[in-house]
Amino acid sequence: MLYFLDLRVHGKVLLVHGKVLRVHGKVLRIHGKVLRVLGTVVLVLQKLTQQRSRLLKRRKVYVRSTLDLEKEQKGNLLSC
């Protein structure tokens, strides 16, 4: 099952609907649940905050849970 997540990049901390993600290579973790990035960056919107001059980027990527990956590996071949 594919999840289409809207990620906000703040250094190495990503926010998905208020939930904190930490990036370890290409692996995302939401409260212990591991999601792996399958797609690439689809959309990047740059925003400026009033107090900081840092750019905030919004990115959309395809991610899939490892449980779904394991199910697919048993039944079908993965197309990378």
Image (spheres, rainbow, N blue to C red):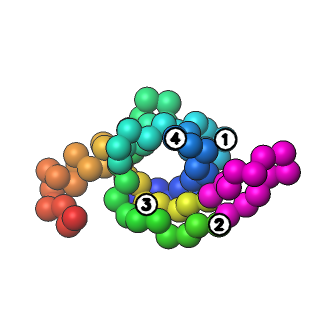
Residue at x-position 62% and y-position 58%: 57
- Left or right, residue 4 beside residue 39: right
N-terminal-most mark, 3 or 4? 4
Q: Please give the label number shown on residue 80.
A: none
Work out how far the residue at label 4 is from the one at label 2, CA to CA, in angstroms: 17 Å
N-terminal-most mark, 4 or 2? 4
- From the image, tell me which residue sits under label 3: 62
Instruction: Evaluate whether residue 77 shows in this view.
Output: yes
Q: Report x, y in % for residue 80.
A: 22, 64
Residue at x-position 38% and y-position 38%: 24
Of residues 28 and 49, the one nearer the viewer is 49
Mark 3 falls on what kind of element?
A: strand
- Please tell me whether residue 15 belongs to the stretch shown in magenta: no
- From the image, tell me which residue sits under label 2: 45
Work out how far the residue at label 2 is from the one at label 1, CA to CA, in angstroms: 18 Å
Q: Residue furthest front?
A: 53
Instruction: Look at the image and tell me in which quarter the N terminus lies.
Output: bottom left
- From the image, tell me which residue sits under label 4: 12
Number of the front mark, 2 or 3 = 2
Q: Report x, y in % for residue 78.
A: 19, 61
Q: How many marks?
A: 4
Q: Amino acid at mark 1?
A: Gly
Segment colored magenta: 46-57
